[in-house]
């Protein structure tokens, strides 16, 4: 079982931002920007581009809804979308509110936000989903 499957199952806590029967969205624990969110399929597949076409298409539409909720909750110029998958072998999409190009820089020092602030961010995205 991957760490993300354990999160989806509720075995490991997460800051939930959105959910439906096939997908789950939650805050990245080491955000590159405030409201950095991960979208994952409940189906356990290693890499995003190994998902079947139907699941990938549906996940993209789900990610779009999450991105709209992020932008409503935290006004930004755009919401960036990235696929890395170098650390966790469970398909996922990164959604990151952007004010500038540098907000997508995964090499920069990660934010460390208090638990109450992370919870408040997730709640606000969930309210707008
Ligand atoms: P990637 O696999 O796309 O290279 O990176 C995985 C991402 O998942 C990283 O940004 C990392 O901070 C995040 N991540 C790894 N483990 C956890 C976890 O247990 N909880 C949460 N919320 N995020 C995680």
Image: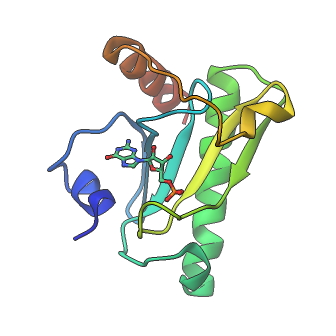
Image vertical order of residue 112 relative to residue 102, above or below:
above
* Percent position of residue 96, x then y: 66, 38
Image vertical order of residue 117 relative to residue 57, above or below:
above
Residue visible at 22% across and 39% down in the picture: 13
Instruction: Give the colour scheme shown.
Output: rainbow
For the residue pair 20 and 7, the one nearer the viewer reads as 7
Q: Dividing the image into 4 quarters, which one contains the C terminus?
A: top right
Using residue 116 as the reference point, say whether residue 106 is left or right of it: right
Give the image quarter of residue 114.
Answer: top left
Q: Dividing the image into 4 quarters, which one contains the N terminus?
A: bottom left
Using residue 8 as the reference point, say whether residue 111 is left or right of it: right
Give the image quarter of residue 122.
Answer: top left
* Percent position of residue 88, x then y: 42, 62
Counting every numbered tag in the picture gives 0
Give the image quarter of residue 117.
Answer: top left
Image vertical order of residue 116 relative to residue 60, above or below:
above
Residue visible at 53% across and 64% down in the picture: 85
* Percent position of residue 17, x then y: 45, 37
Using residue 28 as the reference point, say whether residue 57 is left or right of it: right
Residue visible at 37% across and 74% down in the picture: 43
For the residue pair 64 and 50, the one nearer the viewer reads as 50
* Percent position of residue 6, x then y: 22, 57
């Amino acid at each position: 079982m991957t760490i993300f499957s354990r999160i989806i199952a509720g075995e490991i806590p997460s800051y939930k931002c959105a959910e439906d029967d096939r997908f789950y969205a939650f805050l990245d624990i080491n955000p590159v920007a405030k409201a950095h969110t991960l979208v994952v399929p409940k189906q356990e597949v290693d890499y995003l581009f190994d998902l079947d076409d139907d699941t990938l298409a549906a996940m993209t539409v789900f990610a779009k809804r999450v991105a709209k909720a992020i932008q409503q909750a935290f006004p930004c110029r755009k919401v960036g979308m990235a696929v890395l998958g170098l650390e966790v072998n469970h398909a996922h999409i990164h959604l990151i509110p952007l004010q500038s190009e540098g907000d997508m820089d995964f090499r920069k020092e990660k934010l460390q936000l208090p638990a109450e602030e992370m919870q408040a961010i997730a709640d606000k995205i969930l309210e707008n989903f």
